[in-house]
Structure formats: structure tokens, C-alpha cells
Amino acid sequence: METILSIQNLWKIYPNGTVANQDVSVDIKEGTIHAIVGENGAGKTTLMKVVFGITQAKSGNISLRGKLFAPSQPSEAIDAGIGMVHQHLMLAPELTVAENIVLGVEPKRGGVFFDFDRAVQTAQEISEKYQLAVPVDKPISELPIGTRQRVEILKALYRNAELLILDEPTAVLTPQETEILFQTLDQLKEQGKTIVFISHKLKEVKRIADTVTIMRAAKVIDTKPAAELSIEGIAELMVGHKIDLSRVATPEHIGPAKLSVRNLNMTRDDGVQAVRNVSFEVAGGEILGVAGVEGNGQTELVRALVGLLPVDSGEILVGSTDIAQLSPKDIRQLGVSHIPEDRMEDGVAPLMSIQENIIVDRYEKAEFSTWFRIFWKNVLAHTVGLIRDYRIHAGSPKHEISSLSGGNIQKCVVARELSADPDVVVASQPTRGVDIGSWEHLHTLIVEARNRGRAVFLVSADLDEILKLSTRIIVMFEGEIVARFEDASTVTAQDLGPYMLGIKRQEESSAKVSA
Amino acid sequence: MQRFLLKNFDAVRTAIAILIGMLICVLLIILVSSSPGDSISIFLFGPFSSQRTIASIFEIATPIIFTGVALSIAFQAEQFYIGAEGAFYITAAVGTAFAVSTSMPWFFHIPLILLVSGTFGGLWGLIPGYLKARFNTSEVVTALMLNFVALYAGLYLINNFFRDRAAGFMVSFRLPESAELPRFIDRTRIHWGVVLAIVVAVWAYYFLYHTRTGYEIRTVGHNPKFARFGGINVFKVIIIVHILTGAIAGMGGMVEIMGIHRRFNWQDLPGQGWDGVIVAIIGRMHPLYVVAAAIFLGYLRVGGQQLRLMSDVPFELVLVIQSAIILLITARAFLSQWEARMVIRQATEEAES
């Protein structure tokens, strides 16, 4: 097989000093699916951004079919036959599929006017040619995310892409949608296309890739045929040590309910009912996992539990206190901790120091202040202790928290929330965007909290996480609980998928409603 | 060297901005002056030429320290409250009214006037503060509009009830002697207000960086969502910030009257509120740096006055330099490529070692 893309000794350093790619060399063979795996921040996306001309390397060479290639902007990469499907899809939601596919290289009538009919026709042709069915005349906003992604792929193919780069394409997909995507990729490979697949989901890599390049800390660790690697082997190379992907043991003692939600209803600002008649309980010593495609009411539910959003009706009981009308501070004082979904938005003040971020919920404690003065010495000592106990990689507690990596910022957030000695832990996407080493470490911390008798409410888009940690699982779809699994240890991702997509729902009679 | 430059990059950038600003000024003087050498030396060294000019620097800096420190508190909470000008003016008017209608020994009178003006200034700041905290009204707009209210309400108060008809100008009655801040260096107008200003700045520094409320203020400023998430009462913080800003700026206005003018003689907004914005930004919203920035601004102003008196260079030129310096300091991207190159070089060295 010919080498289509060859990267030699590439260096990329960002203006903030981050070394993203350090002497990276990779050869990609034509007509294969080549996975690039690595923890978040390992430099995989940066490498592809350089190839696609979004950013430029400091040194090193890229050659495309043997010719030196250094795109200074994406259009040059597109002209050279490279297509990229970004993690966050870049489509115009109000335009139709056909319009999105031809956007930028539209067929014109008389050289001036947009030829809508020919756009539809072209889109139809390209869709048939590659056997990727899409409803060409529907607006993007009406399509499910998996179909939108297919549109992105078609868009690249329409621009004659021979080399397709997919950046974490499955991050937003359900297991079923993922399988369809993989069939698509296999088809494209048969038609001679080359695919670069960036991921940190190892099962998927194993399933789809011919060759795997493993990156760690800005360097390439190894490139091998996928057949020679096991999932555990890839994980070990990625992290640098052995990791445990198996499910955690079920808890030994489950106490009385610490968090009970009864008939909760919430409305979003735009008038849509976000949470419909939701009831559940979380007992001390267990983890209740919430599965569901993002945007099905989980965010609103979590924010209500911690007092950041008002509810329309229903009760939220912590112990026996209804907290639905209380302020975030009062709720914290009742022993509720919150690991927020978007850590940079809610979880930290990025430009404040680590110690200032740590004390946001506890600066009023006698240990840290009088009514007037803050004892920075005690704050410093406390922060140093947390940095040590939670194995946070940080220079000094006085450094800006944004100088840490994503995983370490998240560890600071988790350290703060778990060290507050809570009764109830509300964790929303606790490991989003962190590297697999931190992923594992954060899981250990959450399970430890569970074992100490805390009630953990876990919302995550990462099904592996839900399955690994949960004692019980509920599935949310369009603001409702559509399924309850009282014993999570027998549940698989395939079981959850149909409920997450709203294809199936348990009858209320068979679902054990805990109230 | 590289490491040192990177660590103190903000300070380095400010210093370079000031240097370039001064250089632009020198170039302009060379262009317009018939004896550029003399003019440049008057501008640069004139402020130090006599006890009187040195004193002038501090006289000018005193009220600007008040407004600059006041605005630093607001800006640290990310409240773009620009009503310091109005608070400064109307508090001086109200304080004057109070001072001329009361009489008591100075050791009661001065603290009481300061208390009254501080309280009034705080209430004045509370108006946009409450509107912001309760209704999320833009404090920029309300404060700006209130500056006009302050001007005309102040003029109405003084001209109708406290105007000294014996004086040849539109001025208030003279303050009783017990309400005057004493001057403590002969043949200058340096008064105790300068000490008060520095005390306020040091207090504000301590308050912002070493107290609970200061921590709350900075946290709200950095990320209000995070503050709310952590349980900080954002409403309370916004209210406190506006009250403090109004109180300190207002007190500054009254101190200016008590120390320098000794009667209310402003028929228009005097501008110290805007100078406060300038020094708050140059001083990067740190109360102690604001003191330095205010003294620097005083130095520029005195240099400008000297130029006007003793050379053929117009006073307007000084405003040009000020603007040039402030533009350079506030432009975040200024020298950022240089910084990026240094960062990259250092990171490369570290990665290769």
C-alpha cells in the first residue's frame, strides 16, 4: 500500500507554552483506517489541525503522496483532497442538507444565482454514490446528530476528499449510531478512501482501525497494526501504566435514602418542559447513574438539585428538608456537593489561584476566616493537603488554576467537592475531557465517597462511566425517566441505547417507581 | 533573564508602554517647539524643579487616588461603574452644604463631614448598584446618566441655597475653619488629604486581598457563575461594591474641597472621576499600584503645566501623551508576540532538556 500522508519530526508549540507535538512522525497508508489514540491533551487533535491547515507547525515536514505539503489554511488542505469532520459539527442548522453539502462551492445559475435544484440533485447523487442516505431537502436542525455527522462526511466527499479526518466522531453518538457510523467508514474504505480516526475510546478503535498510533504527552509512543494490540495493551501504552476498565464491585451497605426527588417538573426559558414528573431516590452508599443523550433534561435536573435553577413543582428532599426554594449556599450547608458539568463555566474562576478556587465553598469556616479577615496561611496549608491527597499535579497553590491541565483542574474541583464532607454528591459529567489516567483516578475517588456512605447522583454522557460505576441506572429521554434498572451489574450499553433514543420505554407498571 | 521577563510581563509591558508614550511626546515636542531641547527638559524635569512643583504633583494626585481606588474595587468585581465622576461632584456639593451649615470643633467637624460625605457617596453608588443587582440594568448607562443628574442637582443645591453672593463668582460660602483639612508644608497646598488617600488605598488593598468580602468581590469579578455555584451571594456583593465605590469617590470629592478649594467652586464636572478610570486601569486595579499611577499622572500634568507656562508647546500635547500611554497599556495584545516568542523558546528548551 502507498503512503498517502507522511508526517516527519513535527513540532508544535502553542503561544501559551504548551508543547502539543514533540518530534512526531506518523505514516498513513492509503485505503486504511488509521486510528490515533491518546489521552486528552496528548496532541492528537493538534496534529490533525496542522495537517488540515488550521494551525501551523513550528518545524517538521508533512508530505502528501510524496510531495511536501504545508497548508497555511484549511482551504489549501481541502484542495489537496483532505476532509475533516470536527468534534463539534460545523453545519448551518437553518439550511437544508443539500445547501450545507454544497456550501462554499455552490452550483450557480448563470454564474450568479444559487441553483437550488441542482444543489439538491448533486447532493442526491453524492449520497447515492457513497451509499450514505440523507434526507437532502430537510433542514439540519430537524435531524438527529448521527445523520448530521453523515452530512459532514458527505460535505467532505463532495469536495473530493481522499483522506478523511474524523475528530472524536463518536463522542456524541449512541451505541447504535456509532455502529452505523462504523459501517459507513468500512464502506468508504472499500471505495478506496483513507480515514484517520481520532479517539480515546479503545473498544471502538479496536473495532474499526487497521493501524493504531498511540500518543502520550505530545509524543508518538508506537504505531502498530490493530490486530497486534489488545484493548488493555493500547490503554497501557496510552497511560504509561496498567489501568482497570472493569466494573466496580457493588456496595456492601446501602443506607436509607438521602436524596429523594418527587414529581419534579421544570420549564426551560424557551417554554419547553425540560423535566417531566421525575421521581427517584438515592440512598447513602450507592451510585445512581443517569444515562441519556445530552440535552434530555439532565442538565436542568442537576441544576435544580443544587439550587441553581428554580422548579415548577415537585419536591427535592435532602434528608427530610425540601430544598426546592433554598439558595445554593443553604443547600451546600445541608451537605450537598456539586461537581458541575462545565468546569470552566461553573466549577472554577480560571484566572484565580488554585487556593482561591478551593475555598469558594468554605472560606467562612472558622479555620479560614473571622467575620472580616481571611487566614491565607491556613488556606495554603489546606490546599497543599488537598493537592497531595488528591494527587493533583500543580506547582504551587498560588498559581492560576488555568495553568493546570484539564484533568488536574477537574481534580481540584472534585477535591473541593468531596473534601467538603458531603452527604449527597451530585456529579455531572465528572470526567468529561480528562485523560484516561485522571478518568480512572476520579472514578476511584467517587467510589470511595460511595463506600463512605455518601449518596452519589451521577449524570454522564460516557456510557462506559455509567456502566462502570452505577449501582442502579435510570435513563432519561425528553425530560422523563423512561427506564429504571435496579441492578446495574447486568446491564449493557446495548440495553440502554433504545431507551436513550426514545425507541423503547418501560411501562410504568413494570418500572419500579421508587417514591 | 527570559524567565524574569515572563514572570513580570505585565510590569514590563507597562514600563515599555510608558517609555514609548514618553518617546512619542518627545518627538511631538521636537516637531512643534522652536527650542525642543529646552522644552523637553521642562517637560521631563520641570515637575521636580521646585518644592512648589513637587507639591503640585501630590496635590493633583490626591483626589485621583480616591477615585482610582474606588474604581479599582468596582472593576475588580467586573462592575464597570463609571459614576465616580458624579459621586465625586455631588458628594462634594452635599458635603459643602453640610459643612457650612454646621459648626463645631475641628476634631469633631472633620470626621463628621467625612462620615456624612462617605455615607452620601455610598447612597449615590447604591442607585446603579441596586438597579444592576435587582434588574440587571447596565451600570454603565445608569452611572453615566447619573453623572448629569449629579452635576445639575449639585449646581441647584449650591447656587440656590449656599451661594456666596458676596463673591464675584458662582461659588458657595467658604467652609468654616474647623472644616478645613490643614496644609502641612509651607508655601504649598499639600494637605492631610494626601495621607487620608494613602490610608484609604492601603485599606482597600487589605480589604480586597485579605478579607472575606474582598475575596467575594474578586470571585464575583472573575466568574459570577462560579461565585453563585460556590454559594456566594452575588446580589450582596454587587450592592457592597457600588456602595464602597460611591463612598470612596465621594469622600475624595469632599476632601478636595476641604483641602484645596475650601469652598465649592465647580460649575462643571471637574474630571477627577475620569482620571480615576485612567489610573485604575494603569494600576491594573490594584489599590497600591493605583497610588503610583496617580502620582505618575500628577507628574505628567505638572509637566504639562510647566510646558504651557515656560515654552511654546501647547498644553493639549500632554493629553496626547496620556492617551498614547493609556492606549498602549490597555492594549492587551501589545507586545504579545514578543511574549509568545519567549514562551515558545522557553518551552522548547524545557522540552529538549
Image: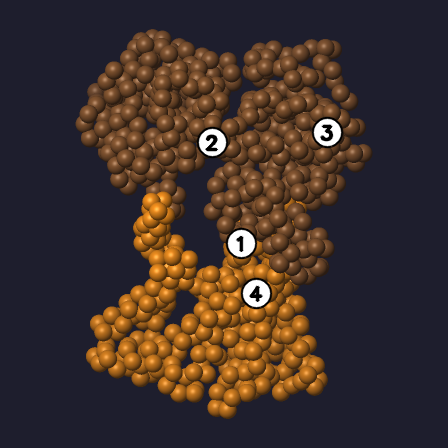
Locate the N terminus of chain A by quadrant: top left
Residue ID at (48%, 67%): B289
Residue under numbered circle 3:
A285
Q: Are discs 4 and 1 less than 8 Å apart at CB?
A: no
Residue under numbered circle 2:
A239
Locate the C terminus of chain A by quadrant: top right
At label 1, the amino acid type is Lys
Q: Check the rendered structure and report the hue given to chain B.
A: orange
Q: CA distance from mark 4 to mark 1?
A: 18 Å
Among the 4 quarters of the image, the one containing residue A12: top left
Residue under numbered circle 1:
A398
Residue B205 numbered tag: 4
Residue ID at (25%, 36%): A60
At label 2, the amino acid type is Val
The numbered mark, 1 or 3, whose residue comes first in the sequence reads: 3
Q: CA distance from mark 3 to mark 2?
A: 30 Å
